[in-house]
Image (tube, rainbow, N blue to C red):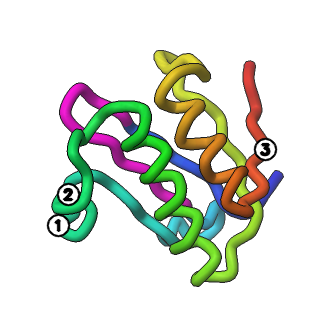
């Protein structure tokens, strides 16, 4: 298992994602459309281009914290498609190795 876990939460009005250290439970990198710096730049707060932007921003912040690998396990109600897949793929495209564990 990787020491860092990816958490993605998507609602109808916002997108939030974070990388958390598994042992200490400290969040190393966080990106979401509710933060002022991101909210001002994006046109929409919950579409697929926004999810891609959140993944890119999270990858930049993760690299600043020396995090290059993470694992992602979807919640029970989440399907690994659409917006969630866009966030994870954007992280991968921007240099973070994400291992996806599907049940």
| Mark 3 secondary-structure assignment | strand
Q: Earlier in the sequence, mark 2 or mark 3?
A: 2
| C-beta proximity under 8 Å, tags 3 and 1 | no
Residue at 25%, 52% (x, y): give it: 42
State left or right for residue 90 relative to residue 40.
right
Residue 65 lies in the magenta stretch: no
- Residues rendered magenta in the picture: 10-19
Q: Which residue, given by chain and number where applicable, does mark 3 sit on? A: 99
Between tags 2 and 3, which lies in front? 2
| C-beta proximity under 8 Å, tags 2 and 1 | yes
> Taking 68 as reference, is 45 above or below it?
above
Give residue 43's quadrant in the image: top left
Q: Which residue, given by chain and number where applicable, does mark 2 sit on? A: 39
Give residue 49's quadrant in the image: top left
**Which SS type dominates the magenta stretch?**
strand
- Provide residue 63's location: percent of width, then percent of height: 64, 76
Tag shown at residue 95: none
Between tags 3 and 1, which lies in front? 1
């Amino acid at each position: 298992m990787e020491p860092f876990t990816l958490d993605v939460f998507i609602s109808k009005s916002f997108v939030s994602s974070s990388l958390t250290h598994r042992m200490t439970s400290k969040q190393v990198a966080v990106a979401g459309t509710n933060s002022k710096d991101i909210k001002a730049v994006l046109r929409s707060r919950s579409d697929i281009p926004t999810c891609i932007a959140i993944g890119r921003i999270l990858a930049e912040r993760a690299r600043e914290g020396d995090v290059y690998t993470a694992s992602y396990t979807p919640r029970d109600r989440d399907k690994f498609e659409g917006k969630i897949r866009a966030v994870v793929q954007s992280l991968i495209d921007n240099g973070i190795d994400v291992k996806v564990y599907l049940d």
